[in-house]
Image (tube, rainbow, N blue to C red):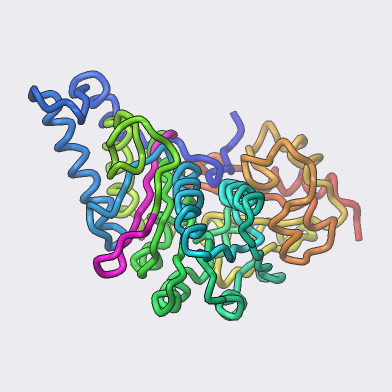
C-alpha cells in the first residue's frame, strides 16, 4: 500500500484512542443526558472531564467549550450564529482572509446574500496575512474577523495571537478556524481569541467530533444564537445526544498529542529536511513562507510538471493531494495559491505533502524523486 502523505486531510485514529473509544461504546455506553441511573452519571462525568481538559489546553474555562461534530459545524455556528446580533446592532461588516477553508468561505457567502459586506484580505506570495492588512480595514460596524490558524494547503501559520490582542481593544469579535493548528502550534490558541473551531480527526481522534471555544470578554458572552434546534444540550447552542465515545476519544487524542508534541515536532522537521534534500535534484518551488510554516506540511510546485499526472504516477508509492480534501475532485487552480498571487501554473499544480512521523518508515524518497525526474522535462 502507498505511503500516506495526506495527514492534513485526516490522520488515522491512534490505537490508544481507539481502545478508549471502544470502551465507551461497548461497556460505558450510557447517555450523558440520563439522570436516573449510574450509566448516565458516569457518561456525564466523562464528558465533564473531557471538557475541562480540552478547555485547559487553550486556556479557556470548561463552560466556554461546546462539543460539535467537527470544525465545519463549529465554523457555521460561530459565523451564522453571530449574524442575528450583527443585524440587530447594525454591524454587518465582516473581514476574512481569501485563503480560508470552504467551511468558512461558504457560510460567509451565505451572509453576503443576506446583506452583510464581507471583505477578503489576500496574503501575498508568503501566504501569511499581515496584521496591518486586517487592522487597516476595521470599521465601527465591523462585526467579525475570521482568520484561520494554519492554512490547510500551505501550512503557513497566521498571526492569530497578535490579532486577538489587538481586537480585544475593539468591539469586533475574532473567530479562528484551528482545524490544522490545534495541539500543533500550542501557545497561539491561548491568546484572547473569542471563538476557536477545533477538529478531532487531524490529531488522531475519530472523525465526527470537534469543539467550539466561546471565550468570554469579562462577564460578556459571545452573542451567538443557535442555528439548529431540538434540545438543550451544549449550552442551548448545539442540540443532540452527546457522542460520549467520540468526546472521550477527542480528549484522549489531545492528551497524547500534547504529551508527545516535542517528539512529533522533532521528527516532522527531520522528515521535512529529508524530503527537501531529495527534492533538490528536481526543479521546484515551495509555496508559502518556510519561516512561518508548521513542520508537517509542505506545498510544492514542480517546474513544467502537471501535479495531477504526478499523483497518478506516484499512486502506488505515496498518497498525496493537490490541496484541501474538500476540493480535491476539482482540477481548478487552488484558491489559496491564486490568492497568494502565484502564477497560474504554480497555483494549478501545487502538491501538498503532509505527514505523521510514525507512518513514513517505509517511504522510498529516492523512488519518488525518480518519478518526478522522469516526468519533468530537462531545463
Residue 379 located left or right of residue 230: right
Give the vertical position of 269 relative to 25 (above or below): below
- Which residues, given as a range, are shown in magenta? 207-223
Q: Main secondary structure of the magenta part?
A: loop
Residue, x 45% and y 41% (percent of image)?
227
Judge by depth and name the residue closer to the eye, 374 or 5.
5
Q: Position of residue 30 (x, y in %)?
A: 19, 23
Q: Quadrant of the C terminus?
A: bottom right
Residue drawn at the location 28% of the way across and 29% of the way down: 19
Quadrant containing the N terminus in the rendered view: top right
Q: Residue at x 55, y 70 (%)?
A: 292
Question: Which residue: 69% across, 62% down?
Answer: 287
Query: Residue 74 at what x, y percent from top left?
Result: 44, 46
Is residue 214 inside the magenta stretch? Answer: yes
Residue 175 x %, y %: 46, 60
| Residue at the far top in the pictured view | 26
Q: Quadrant of residue 371?
A: top right
Nearer to the camera, 171 or 291: 171
Question: In the depicted view, which residue is nearer to us: 369 or 57?
Answer: 57
Q: Is residue 246 magenta?
A: no
Q: How many marks?
A: 0
Amino acid at each position: 500500500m502507498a505511503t500516506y502523505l495526506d495527514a492534513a486531510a485526516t490522520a488515522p485514529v491512534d490505537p490508544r484512542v481507539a481502545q478508549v473509544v471502544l470502551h465507551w461504546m461497548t461497556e460505558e455506553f450510557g447517555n450523558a443526558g440520563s439522570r436516573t441511573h449510574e450509566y448516565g452519571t458516569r457518561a456525564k462525568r466523562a464528558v465533564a472531564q473531557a471538557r475541562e481538559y480540552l478547555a485547559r489546553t487553550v486556556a479557556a474555562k470548561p463552560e466556554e467549550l461546546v462539543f460539535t461534530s467537527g470544525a465545519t459545524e463549529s465554523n457555521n455556528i460561530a459565523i451564522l450564529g453571530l449574524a442575528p446580533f450583527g443585524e440587530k446592532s447594525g454591524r454587518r461588516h465582516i473581514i476574512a482572509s481569501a485563503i480560508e477553508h470552504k467551511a468558512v468561505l461558504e457560510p460567509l457567502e451565505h451572509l453576503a446574500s443576506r446583506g452583510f459586506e464581507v471583505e477578503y484580505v489576500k496574503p501575498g506570495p508568503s501566504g501569511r496575512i499581515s496584521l496591518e492588512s486586517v487592522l487597516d480595514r476595521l470599521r465601527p460596524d465591523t462585526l467579525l474577523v475570521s482568520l484561520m490558524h494554519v492554512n490547510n494547503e500551505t501550512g503557513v501559520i497566521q498571526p492569530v495571537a497578535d490579532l486577538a490582542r489587538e481586537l480585544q481593544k475593539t468591539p469586533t469579535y475574532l473567530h479562528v478556524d484551528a482545524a490544522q493548528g490545534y495541539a500543533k502550534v500550542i501557545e497561539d490558541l491561548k491568546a484572547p481569541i473569542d471563538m476557536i473551531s477545533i477538529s478531532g480527526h487531524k490529531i488522531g481522534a475519530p472523525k465526527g467530533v470537534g469543539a467550539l471555544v466561546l471565550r468570554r470578554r469579562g462577564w460578556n458572552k459571545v452573542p451567538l444564537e443557535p442555528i439548529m434546534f431540538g434540545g438543550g444540550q451544549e449550552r442551548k447552542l448545539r442540540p443532540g445526544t452527546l457522542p460520549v465515545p467520540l468526546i472521550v476519544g477527542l480528549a484522549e487524542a489531545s492528551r497524547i498529542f500534547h504529551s508527545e508534541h516535542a517528539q512529533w515536532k522533532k521528527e516532522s522537521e527531520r522528515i521535512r529536511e529529508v524530503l527537501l534534500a531529495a527534492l533538490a535534484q528536481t526543479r521546484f518551488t515551495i509555496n508559502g513562507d518556510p519561516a512561518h510554516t508548521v513542520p508537517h506540511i509542505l506545498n510544492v510546485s514542480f517546474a513544467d510538471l502537471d501535479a495531477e499526472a504526478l499523483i497518478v504516477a506516484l499512486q502506488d508509492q505515496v498518497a498525496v493531494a493537490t490541496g484541501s480534501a474538500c476540493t480535491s475532485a476539482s482540477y481548478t487552480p487552488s484558491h489559496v495559491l491564486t490568492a497568494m498571487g502565484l502564477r497560474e501554473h504554480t497555483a494549478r499544480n501545487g502538491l501538498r505533502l503532509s505527514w505523521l512521523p510514525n507512518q513514513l518508515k517505509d517511504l522510498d524518497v529516492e523512488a519518488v524523486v525518480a518519478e518526478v525526474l522522469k516526468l519533468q522535462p530537462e531545463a
